[in-house]
Image (cartoon, rainbow, N blue to C red):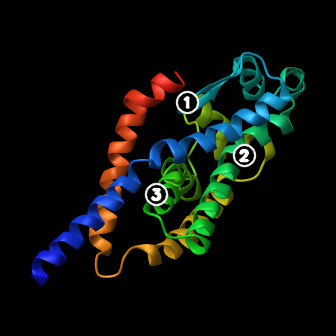
Amino acid sequence: MSEVAAADSTGRTALRWFAGGLVAAPLGILPHEIGHFLVLLALGVPDLTLHFVGVTWDLEEFWLAVWREDYATAATIAPLWGVALSDAAGPLATYVLVLACCYGCATWRPHPALVAVAYFAQARINVATQYAWRRLFNSELPSDLEAMAAGANFDELRVAILTGVPVPLLVGFALVFLAATGAWLLRYLPRGRRIVAAVSMVVGMIVSLVAYAGYVGPWLLP
């Protein structure tokens, strides 16, 4: 009888944490993009559109001027500080979201969805981390401007180009934040079933990302 109860409890744990992971993609991605969008909306940039995994506006001429280091021309299209703020607003929104999830776990209850969203929202730093690592240890790496012209594109890189703050410093802060909040959230995985909960949550996240990127997102915000 006890074995049946244990199996049932394990199954319930797996189901709860899988279900929590199912909301991770939309709730982990959209606040980040809305952060970008709201700042750009306040700036009044042309042709601004919010998409399910990004924000677009008529930025080609702005960045062409930046690549030429013609900042005076770029500033006539949009204020450099404003574009830098819009690029920083996404990560800042993510930090606020993660802190809100942590606060919810601590003061309300450790709902699996809160834990899943907090972890998923920070997964975006992976690409930036790879670039920052190469920037630190490869002296032959092109400049940030050249790297962006060659296709590198993430928030911290654009902020670095417009403000002069080094990419490794921005990414380093994000990694410290991830390590601190990630370690703190581990306490909310159920004791004795942490592996079951973690694996189920990750599977739910994967399903969430596939569904959001492939179906829900394009339908909601093409």
Which numbered disc covers residue 88? 2
Residue 149 appears left or right of 166: left
- Residue 101, compared with residue 204, is above or below; it is below
The residue carrying pointer 1 sits among few (fewer than 14), some (14 to 19) or many (20 or more) residues within 10 Å by Cα, namely: few
Residue in view at x 36 percent, y 76 percent: 190
Q: Amino acid at mark 3?
A: Ala
- Residue 6, compared with residue 113, is above or below; it is below
Instruction: Say which label, 1 or 3, has the lower sequence index.
Output: 3
Q: Which label lies toward us, 1 or 3?
A: 3
**Where, by quadrant of the figure, is residue 153 drawn?**
top right
Residue in view at x 70 percent, y 37 percent: 36
Task: Please give the residue where the numbered disc 3 appears in the rendered image.
Answer: 113
Q: Amino acid at mark 1?
A: Ala
Instruction: Say which label, 1 or 2, has the lower sequence index.
Output: 2
Q: Position of residue 187 (x, y in %)?
A: 46, 78
- Residue 13, compared with residue 142, is above or below; it is below
SS label for mark 3: helix
Q: Depth check: give the residue in front, 218 or 20.
A: 20
Which numbered disc covers residue 150? 1
Residue in view at x 9 percent, y 81 percent: 1
Q: Position of residue 157 (x, y in %)?
A: 65, 43
Q: Depth check: give the residue in front, 170 or 24.
A: 24
Residue in view at x 51 percent, y 26 percent: 220
Q: Amino acid at mark 2?
A: Ala
Distance CA(mark 1)–CA(mark 3): 38 Å
SS label for mark 1: loop
Residue 79 appears left or right of 23: right
Distance CA(mark 2)–CA(mark 3): 25 Å
Q: Position of residue 207 (x, y in %)?
A: 32, 44
Q: Depth check: give the residue in front, 214 or 168.
A: 214
The residue carrying pointer 2 sits among few (fewer than 14), some (14 to 19) or many (20 or more) residues within 10 Å by Cα, namely: many
